[in-house]
Amino acid sequence: MKPEIRIAKKEELPDLLALEKLCFKEETFHKKQLGYLLLKAKSLVLVASADDKIIGSMIVLLRENIMQARIYSLNVHPSYRRMGIGRSLMDTALEFLKERGFRKFTLEAGVNNTAARNLYESKSFSVDKILRSYYKNGDDALHFTKNL
Ligand SMILES: CC(C)(COP(=O)(O)OP(=O)(O)OC[C@H]1O[C@@H](n2cnc3c(N)ncnc32)[C@H](O)[C@@H]1OP(=O)(O)O)[C@@H](O)C(=O)NCCC(=O)NCCS
């Protein structure tokens, strides 16, 4: 199964919200926030689609004044994990950012989120700081960066 990785369409907002809720039970975007990111903000919103469904998504905020980008969210549907979809979304975002001259890519991941940490480390992101009690449940986060 090879999903298509492409820019999200605005009518896909409900599918993106549903996937977000499924992947992040506690800390999810609200419809308004996600709608803003999809429609108005300087952002890159990618989806992975297969079997006529959205099975993965990635939201990247683009800070063009300093040519830095930050991952806001990355989700793969639980039934489609460990098939390379997270990596494909990341590769597409990296290609997009490099083509447009972005210099730095940053993100946060929970200290206990082994899947995310392994994915980012495999893409040569490195930890530059620990963000104490970053999440609502009190968990710390690691701040990752990668020079492009
Ligand atoms: C993190 C997440 C996006 C990874 O997506 P995925 O499509 O399953 O990842 P991939 O199949 O592309 O895996 C790429 C690499 O990540 C690492 N990885 C992925 N899942 C892993 C797991 N369950 N355990 C350990 N390493 C894992 C591996 O290094 C893997 O490479 P390999 O399969 O060649 O060993 C997915 O697990 C997810 O949606 N999690 C919930 C939401 C989340 O935590 N998002 C990240 C927020 S910071």
Image: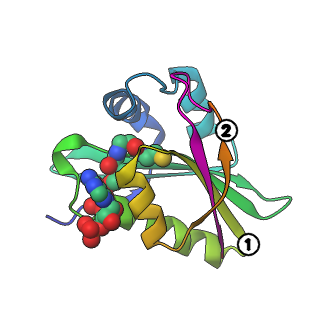
Q: Which residues are magenta?
A: 134-147
Question: Which x, y percent locates residue 48?
Answer: 33, 54
Q: Secondary structure at mark 1?
A: loop
Q: Residue at x 37, y 65 (%)?
A: 87
Residue 144 colored magenta?
Answer: yes
Instruction: Please name whichever residue, 142 or 101, is drawn nearer the observer in this view of the structure.
Output: 142
Q: Residues within 10 Å of mark 1 (few under 14, many from 20)?
A: some
Q: Residue visible at 42% across and 72% down? A: 122
Where is residue 54, by image quadrant? Answer: top left
Cα–Cα gap, marks 2 and 1: 23 Å
Quick one: quadrant of the N terminus?
A: bottom left
Q: x%, y% of residue 93?
A: 52, 65
Residue 68 in the magenta stretch? The answer is no
**Which residue appears at 73% of the width and 72% of the height?**
103
**Residue at mark 2:** 40
Q: Quadrant of residue 75?
A: top left
Residue located beneath label 1 in the image: 103
Q: Secondary structure at mark 2?
A: loop
Beta carbon at label 2 within 8 Å of ligand 1: no
